[in-house]
Amino acid sequence: MIYVASSWRNKWQQEVVKHLRENDFDVFDFRNPCNDDVRWNEIWSKMDPNWQKWSFHDGIRFLDHPLSQTGFALDFSAMNRSSAAVMVMPCGKSAHLESGYFVGAGKPLVIFTPQDCQYPEGEPELMYLMASQIVDKIDLVVKTLRLHGVNI
């Protein structure tokens, strides 16, 4: 399985999932992890409509909420079952932590930065050198995964 790490707001995430599936890869899609109608991108607002005003301590407290625990378990289980990850830029904190997990586990990580995507805040990142490859074309994602022996 391939774990696609990205942001809910990333306009390329679904295109990458589709392209990988069209190339016969089994893909975990965090936007629809259970093939159900649950809108996991609304997890915080389901817990509290005022979630954007949470303090640091509120955020920590809500990590114990059953929805947080379920969402984490779905993602982390998929990470453990996956043989590689593709981080689709631009993305945020979760995708970067997930990508670091793959590097630490010795699993291939491909960073896909579409050609019209800018680095966050206009700055490159030295730690991206940990990735197996950084590519700017979707076809190179598949080629790189196969080059690194990722099974379909």
Image (cartoon, rainbow, N blue to C red):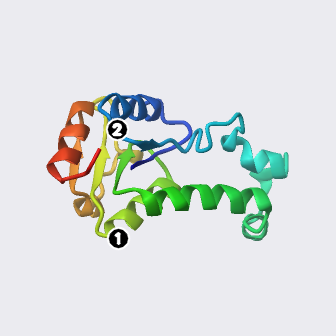
Provide the residue designation for mark 2.
Answer: 118
The label number, if any, that marks residue 42 in the structure image: none
Q: Amino acid at mark 1?
A: Ala
10 Å neighbourhood of mark 1: few (<14), some, or many (≥20)?
Answer: few
Question: Where does residue 140 sit, x and y in percent of width and height?
Answer: 20, 37
Question: Where does residue 94 sit, x and y in percent of width and height?
Answer: 52, 57
- Regarding mark 1 in the picture, which secondary structure is present there? loop
Question: Where does residue 112 sit, x and y in percent of width and height?
Answer: 30, 42
Provide the residue designation for mark 1.
Answer: 105
Q: In terms of image quadrants, where is residue 19? A: top left
Query: In the image, what residue occupies the spot 85% across and 51% down?
Result: 48
* Depicted 151 relative to depicted 55: above or below: above
> Would residue 77 be found to the left or right of residue 25 on screen?
right
Q: Quadrant of the C terminus?
A: top left
Q: Nearer the viewer, residue 118 or 33?
A: 33
Q: Nearer the viewer, mark 2 or mark 1?
A: 1
Q: In terms of image quadrants, where is residue 35? A: top right
- Tell whether label 1 touches label 2 (CB within 8 Å): no
